[in-house]
Image: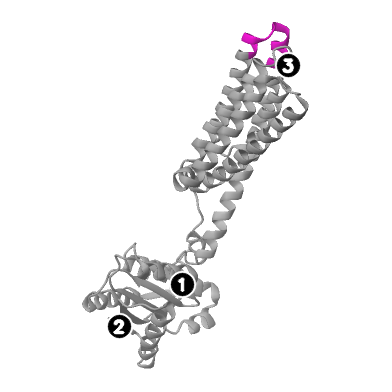
Amino acid sequence: MNDSINDSTIYKNKSFIKNKNMYRLYKNEINKRNYKMLLYVSVSLLLLGLLFLLVNWIFHVFNDGTKYIYIFWISFSCLCLACCVLLYQWFVNHATAILYIFLSGIMMSMIISGTYFYRENASAIMIGCIASMPILIFDELWRFYLFDFFICILFIICSFITKSFSISIIDCVNTLTFCFISCMIGMYTIRLKLYDVKSKYQMMEQLQTDQLTGLMSRNAIIKEIESYYKSENRTSGALFIIDIDHFKKINDTFGHLQGDRVLIEFAQIIRENFRESDYMARLGGDEFLVFAKDIDNIETIKEIAERLNQKVRKEITLMENHIYLTVSTGIVLSKRFTNFEELYVLADKMLYEVKEKNKNGYKIYNNN
C-alpha cells in the first residue's frame, strides 16, 4: 500500500455518471420514452380521427378535404401501432427517428388542411400543433429546433402559395411567434426530461455501487454472479471473500476516517490484482467479495491469492504510526451453482478456518 493517502482520495472513487454528451449516454432511455410517446400520439390521433369522422357524419361540419385528413390519421396511426407491436425491439431502438417521421406525416397533413382546404382563413390549428411539439419530442435541442423551424417554414411557404397575401402575413407572424415560443418551451422541457433521466441513472448507480470505494454493492454483485451461472458459455468461477485482519483495531486506534482511507486503498489493490472483467464488491465494513470468471485451475487461484497477500503486506503510516496490514481470504471454486448463498457459505467457511489459524492467508474449496 502507499505510505500516505490524501484526504481527497476518499471522494475520488464515488462513481457517478459523467459525460459531456448525455444524449448519447442515455440514448436507450430516450428511445424508450419516445417509443411511449409514439404509442400515446398514435392512439390519440386514432381516437380523434374516429371522433371527428363520427361528428362529421352526424353534423356535416367539415369539408370533404378535411375528411380525408382524418382518414389519413386513422390509417397512419393504425399502421404505426401495428408496427410497434410486430417490430417492438426495432421500433424501441429507433424510436426517436420514427417519432420524427410519424410527426412529419401528421404535420404535413395539418399543413395541407390549414392551407389548401382552408384558404380563406388564418390557420389557428397549426399554431396549436407547433406549441405542442416540445411535449411530444425528447431529443437533442438542435435537432428539435431544426425540425420545429422546418415545419414552420414549410407551412409559411404553403400559406403564401395557396392563400391571399394578407392572410399569409397573419399566418407567417403567428407561426414564427409560436415557433419561438415552442423553442423556448422545448429548451426547458427537454432539459427537464434529461435531468429526470440523469437523476434516475445516478440513483440506480448509487444503489449498485459502494459509495466509499467505488466497487459494486452486495446486491449488484449477486445479480452478476447469478447471471453468469445462467449463461450458456459459463465455465467454473471462483468466489473470494477477503477480510482485512485486525481492522476493528485500526478503527478503534486511529478513528474511522483513517479506517476509510485503508478501505479505499485496499479497494484499489483489489482492482489491480484482479481482471477488469471480474466482479468486485464491498459487502460492508472490511469485508470484500470478488468473483473471478472462467477459472478452473487451482494453481491460478493460488497465484492470485498469493499476489494479493504480497501486495497488502506492506508498511503504511497512519497518524505517524507504522503498521502492517494482512488479509484473510476464503475461496470456493465451483462450476455447479444452485444459489449465491451456497457459494457464500462455502467461501465463508474457508475464511473462518484461515482466521482460526492466525489469519494472514487463504484457503480454497474445490466444489467442481
Of residues 355 and 199, the one nearer the viewer is 199
Please name the colour scheme applied to the rendered image.
one colour
Q: Which mark is residue 367?
A: 2
Residue assigned mark 1: 282
Of badges 2 and 1, the one in the foreground is 2
Number of numbered tags placed on the structure image: 3
| Residue 355 seen in the current view | yes
- How packed mark 3 is, by other alpha carbons closer than 10 Å (few <14, some 14-19, many 20 or more), is many
Q: Secondary structure at mark 2?
A: loop
Do the numbered discs 2 and 1 sit on residues whose CB atoms are within 8 Å? no
- How packed mark 2 is, by other alpha carbons closer than 10 Å (few <14, some 14-19, many 20 or more), is some
Q: Give whichever of discs 1 and 3 has the lower sequence position.
A: 3
Residue assigned mark 3: 122
Tell me: 55 left or right of 69: right
Q: Secondary structure at mark 3?
A: loop
Q: Quadrant of the N terminus?
A: bottom left
Cα distance, mark 2 to mark 3? 80 Å
Q: What x and y, as percent, mark residue 311?
A: 32, 73
Residue segment shown in magenta: 159-173
Do the numbered discs 1 and 3 sit on residues whose CB atoms are within 8 Å? no
Of badges 2 and 3, the one in the foreground is 3
The residue under the point 52% across, 82% down is 253
